[in-house]
Image: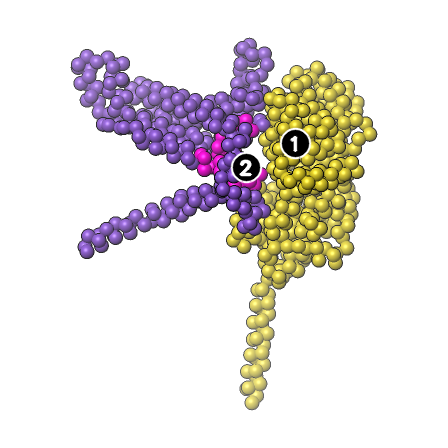
Chain colours: A yellow, B purple
Amino acid sequence: MKRNVGTLVFSLLMILLISMVSFAEAKIELTVQTYWDPAMGSGMKLEQSFRDFMALHPNIEVKHIFLPRDQLVQRVLSQVLTDTLPDIVFADNPWVRQWAEAGVYKDITPLIAQWEHYEDFFQGTRDACTFQGRVYALQLVTNNLALYYNTDMFKELGIAEPPKTWDDIKTISAKITANLSGVYGLAFSAWDDEECTWQFEPFLWSNKGSLLELDQPEAVAALQFWTDLVSEGYTARDALNWRQQDVTQQFINRKTVMMIMGPWEITSQLKDVDFEYGIVPVPVPKAGYNPVSPMGGECFGMSSSIDPSKVEAAWQLIDYLVSPEHMADFTAAAATVPTRGSALEFVLDRDPRLEVFAKQAEYALARTVVGGGEKYPEISAIARSAIQRALSGMMDPQTAFKQAADEIKELWPIEEYEVLKNEVREIHNR
Amino acid sequence: MGKLKYRLGCYLFLLPAIIYICLLLIYPLIYNIELSFRDVSLISYMRGTSKYLGLGNYQKLFRDPIFHRILCNTAIFMVLSIVFQFVLGLLLALLFNRDFPLNNIFQGLILLPWFVPIMVKGNIFRWFFSDMGTINGFLSSLGIISHPIPWITSKSLPIISLSIANIWLGIPFNFILLYTGLKAIPVELYECAQIDGARQWHQTIYITLPLLKPVIVTTLMLGSIFTIKVFDLVWIITKGGPGNISHLFSTYSYALAMEQFKFGMGAAVAIVMVLIVTAITIGFHCIKVDY
């Protein structure tokens, strides 16, 4: 009898032990697929964050899969068709609405409803991740565009103030090109890529122009201004072939005194420059206009095919990533800007150079919201083709944008276009 | 019975090749054709809800001014590339077919463009042709030009500049094929001709070229196929810009499908390219090659 009890106790203990072991082994595994290279900047920081998160949550294992940016969309396409999406779906913010409509994302509105921090996120980032009133993702970081200027060269030439208006840019550029040969005033990126549309948007939007009405005088004036810069020799014609990183190279090599650029260069290409530079908002058409920047940055959501048992863990991870402390930590390491108000102060303490970008983040516009929603990639392609035609002198700005506007109008049935156009107009007139 | 078994055995050996061709060539091609008849966007692709359009994409394409430009670009690009690559490659092959000091070293140098990765070559050309680039710097230092020539930022020059880059890239290929062909011509023929009093010039016309004809046809055919499908070079140097004026079939197809997510239109462009390549190949096969 005694022996029987012993056996019973032993086997019970064994069962307990085995179940504990298997419980410990049954870690919840989450996969996250991003285009942030783990060898540097954001990717390196993200993997560090995952390790910190796993230390706090020993039952969750987070795996990071890195893909180059141009391969990510293609991979997601095939993953949707084969039902093999990663648990956490990462996307550049202009992709989110389109992917939500295509059924890539899980609707996280119910989780957001029980969460008190959502209102803390800036409007632009909330808009970018919302489709037909439902929330699909949260944005971790944001960035936007500003004007960088070489303070040393400004001093040498006796230029007291950085430019505030388009006229200021021209006056300063005239002074630069008259005094220094081979040096240009302003550099921007206008190659045949989203980067061109993106760099043009602050000029278009601060003049209250709309991507859906490129034939209107506000939009044409913005293109006229860019074209003037090139034709008057204030901006190199080579801008038509410059990627954003080439623009920074021009700035570093003192071939240009001002450039349009985002915050990320502060900790990458501009890290070791041997001159002083300042950052101000992108100049506006006239005094009294407000600078408006397009909003960049990446978002995290859950895949529509996520296993229900993983949802809680996935939400814990997203909640951790977008918490103000982590967000501040992350953005300071990667030289980007937080997406929520309460994280802002932490960041400015760490790097005051981010101030302009941080201030602009609050009012930056999501490209999909004012650029035709899921048709934004097409609209951007049409717009930048017209911009390139004007800058290269093939067409005058008026004709180029008239053609583009006609093409864009045809993307929708006419009534639908009218509604959309008026919605966007309202946003720009706010 | 035995014969049938033997035949089955033979087909068995062909099986891997047939499977390979079906999976990696025929299936994608059919899939592409099917895509080109549909209105496929990112959303309808993911949801599987694309509408059947019939020839709609093709009609749209043939009305598209960018497409007209591409036909024109492709013609210029092919003629310039093929003619110059071939002539320069042939001249070099004839040159290296003779003995002279350091022949081997120079041959190695000619092949150099082949060993450089296309990313590097493309970016070097982008810089080479830019307003502040090497070629403009050189010309203005000689006092030939006062303003930089917009090699890759103007209305009509970009396709010419791209052709120049492609010619440079294609010379080694033409050279190596033609050179190998030359080496295969028996020396005795030249010796006979010399005894009969034929001059160098006559030898080239009456011996070298006729015997080289099969190699020449192959070189031109492969050259045309490689030229019509050039992608990376254009993508890196101009990306089809400025204002979509320097696109080729491949770059436009990629831009439509992968940047604007108009998969149906992208597929239609690719199919047109495939048809043209097929026509060219058939054309070359029709040229009689007699030995």
Residue A116 in sight in this render: yes
| Callout 1 crowding tier (Cα within 10 Å): few <14, some 14–19, many ≥20 | many
User: Looking at this rendering, what residue extends furthest in the bottom direction?
Assistant: A1
Write down the residue under mark 1. Answer: A405
**Left or right of residue A407: residue B100:** left
Chain containing mark 1: A
What residue do we see at 54% from left, 46% from top?
B51
Pinpoint the chain carrying mark 2. Answer: B
Q: Position of residue A118 (x, y in %)?
A: 75, 51
Instruction: Specify the segment rendered in magenta.
Output: B244-273
Give coordinates of residue B76: x percent, y percent: 46, 23
> Secondary structure beneath disc 1?
helix
Q: Residue at x 60, y 22 (%)?
A: A394
Q: Which mark is residue B27?
A: none
Specify few, some or many for label 2: CA neighbours under 10 Å numbering under 14, 14-19, or 20 or more.
Answer: some
In the picture, the disc for residue B256 is 2
Q: Position of residue B193 (x, y in %)?
A: 19, 17
Q: Quadrant of the N terminus of chain B?
A: bottom left
Instruction: Give the left or right position of residue B119, taking residue B216 as reference.
Output: right
Q: Main secondary structure of the magenta part?
A: helix
**Is residue B251 within the magenta segment?**
yes
Q: Which residue appears at 37% of the width and 20% of the height?
A: B87
Q: Give the residue at x 71% y 29%.
A: A216
Q: Does A82 appear above or below B105?
A: below
